[in-house]
Image (cartoon, grey):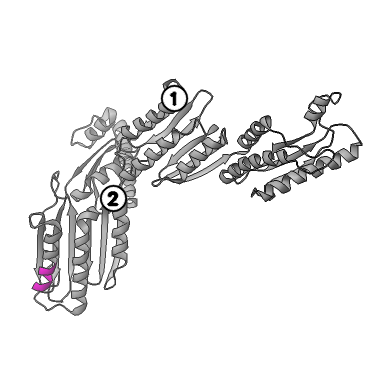
Amino acid sequence: MARLCRLMRAPVLVPMLVGLAALFTIGACTTVETDVADSVRSALDVAGMEEVTVDDVAYRNVTLAGPHMLETDALSVAGALAATQDVRFVGTGGEPESAPPAPTEVTAAAIDVNAGNIDVTGTVDGGRMILQGVVPDEATRALLVAAAESAFGEQNTTYDLMVGGVVAAPEVTAAATELANVIDLLPERLASGRLALDNSTLAVRGEAATVASARSLRSSIESLTGIEGRADILAPRVAATDFSAVLTATGISLTGVVPDEAARTQLVAAAEAAFGGAGVVDELTVEGVAATAEQMEAIAEAADLIGLLPGALESGDLRLRDATLGIRGTASSLDGLANLTVAAEGADAARARTDIDAGQAATRAIEQVLARDTITFASGSAELTENGSATLDRVADVLTRAMSVDRQVRIEIAGHTDDRGDEAANLALSQARAETVWDYLAGQGVAAARLLPVGYGEAQPVAENTTAAGRAQNRRIEFLEG
């Protein structure tokens, strides 16, 4: 279609036999090219590249023209459109540019040099600076040239500043001084861009060297006091970090996006060390952009935490998104969970958040305590024996550790009796014993509000009440996840 469109625009004689078809094709070409041109123009305007023009459109092949420093961004914006096929860029003079544009001559015919005003533009690209425009006097010119040469080096500074021959007014001198101060900030903060000072307004636009320098430069320009500062500073593209490590029945699965191959290698190595090579599923996507030092530090912290997961969680996941690290799941061990929590809280580069259910781990740990020692009371009463108190000391330690890492833990203290005696009396006794345990644990520093004492009497036996051994088993205190 593109070739046919070009043919129909050439000065050739079209046979009458295909006249109608040619007319249709020309109309189609015109419509397509108009739509393409409109789409590209709109996209460039949205991106803030009004200085770039749509020089030519041949079907879906587009030629752009504009300043050299906008070439990469303009090609990216136009090339991303579905409406375009091939996009090329030429300099404002019509020829491809391989270096920053040379200064254009500024004449008195273009600007009133006798008004005592200052009208200066500066272009930053590739570590070079070009100053152009009109200044009121030689002192102002010297100030700006010295600032540029100091910041970028004499060999990297080009200037074409016309002197008006009028002594600068105090406010113009103040504006020039502010401009000189801003120029001093540019080499380490602005990768490419343009600044313009028109008497009392300084506008700076372009792409910063780093995310931090974008914020710093915006703040410096917008906080100018002698003149109005306007900043349109884009931060550079930063590699994405958004990955998850999900526990599975056989190990761990790594999914999501990491900046580069080094980050992927570090995470996979940590997972294999913790779960074994056969237990790791690697589905990470490498973005192919070098990670920043901060990102690599956060990824290293995530890798260290992956190594602690097997001993801490029975299910759950770890996710790092930019600098936010989240760990959630169900704990398998209070000791392992404590190690994981301490390591997460100690992370410097990543802001760690944990949401881990420690209830099951707590009740399992208490069961292990009660398998060795029982909570005993004086016969027929709710008074703890000495051995019963000692056992509850160990239970209190378990609950304190569980509640310190999981503020949602709720534990039911369940009291039970055998079937000897009156049923109502047994129910009352089981309730009294559960409350005695609750009171003792609270005295040991366990959060009383997260404990619930409940008596069940003889209603839930775990053994036959026909033997002494069976009845002893039924007289018990249980700790259940609430």
**Image location of residue 339, percent across then percent down:** 49, 39
* Residue 210 - label: 2
User: As drawn, is 243 to the left or to the right of 200?
Assistant: right
Give, as a three-letter code, the residue at label 2.
Thr
Residue 141 is drawn in which quadrant?
Answer: bottom left
Quarter holding residue 324: top left
Residue wearing tag 1: 280
For disc 1, the neighbor class at 10 Å (few under 14, some 14 to 19, many from 20) is: many
How packed mark 2 is, by other alpha carbons closer than 10 Å (few <14, some 14-19, many 20 or more), is some
Q: Which secondary structure is most common in the magenta stretch?
A: helix
Q: Quadrant of residue 370?
A: top right
Residues drawn in magenta: 138-143
Distance from the alpha carbon under mark 2 to that under mark 1: 35 Å
Lower sequence index among marks 2 and 1: 2
* The N terminus sits in image quarter: top left
Given contact means CB atoms under 8 Å apart, are the residues at marks 2 and 1 in contact?
A: no
Question: Residue 283: x and y, percent?
Answer: 42, 28
Q: Judging from the image, what secondary structure is the residue with disc 1 in? A: strand
